[in-house]
Image (cartoon, coloured by chain):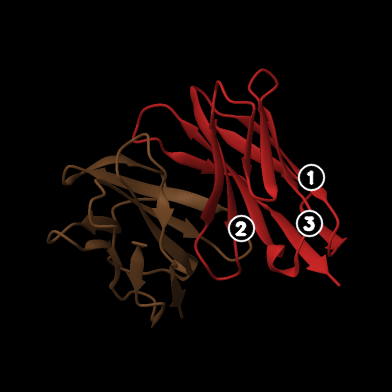
Amino acid sequence: KNQVEQSPQSLIILEGKNCTLQCNYTVSPFSNLRWYKQDTGRGPVSLTIMTFSENTKSNGRYTATLDADTKQSSLHITASQLSDSASYICVVSAKGGGNKLTFGTGTQLKVEL
Amino acid sequence: EPEVTQTPSHQVTQMGQEVILRCVPISNHLYFYWYRQILGQKVEFLVSFYNNEISEKSEIFDDQFSVERPDGSNFTLKIRSTKLEDSAMYFCASRMTEVYEQYFGPGTRLTVT
């Protein structure tokens, strides 16, 4: 069964600090891995998308890594801001079938002053 | 920038009633999806739709659910006889082609009483 696990479940950091969120997956056959940011009560918004051949991708202060051999990914947030407070969801897509997405449970990040 | 829109933002209905959730995907997109997120849980795939037919559905998407693209712009999810456990946030998403990003709408919060 395709699964995506994330850690930590929640995280509190001070504004300006960096943090790294982790994702492990068992999705086959693998197509791509995405990180989404979801504000409370809103739809997920894409941050990065990586295919099998990519091992790092950046989007501003967000940098995602992918190790397809160990089936692990991380999302690093640099110089956090209060507006970064949200749920960060790792999502893996399998090949075929309209690229159905398998979602992780998310890491709830809170950035405080 | 084009975006996926959903109406209503919040729907309250009594158990056993039929509800229709509406979505307007991005205009040149060809693949359409419905997801749901029960409060505090992860986003779950319901159904994908392409070329006027369902391409894949999850075990959640039973006979009580149906989808339709009645005209060139709307994409609807109907729940025939709602149950308490159908209470959730329902997200519509659309994609241009299989290799492009999925864009999510803001969601409809369905509350079944």
Name the kind of residue labelled 2 in the image: Gln
Q: Which mark is residue B41?
A: 2
Q: Amino acid at mark 1?
A: Thr
* The disc label shown at residue A10, or none: 3
> Is mark 3 in CB contact (under 8 Å) with mark 1?
no
Label 1 sits on a secondary structure element that is strand
Q: Colour of chain B?
A: brown
- Between circles 1 and 2, the one closer to the viewer is 1
3D distance between C-alphas at marks 1 and 2: 22 Å
* Tag 2 secondary structure: loop
Residue at image position (12%, 61%) is B71
Q: A87 or A63: which is nearer to us?
A: A63
Query: Is A26 left or right of A6, judged from the image as shown?
Result: left
The reply to the same-chain question for discs 3 and 1 is yes
Chain letter behind tag 1: A
Picture colour for chain A: red
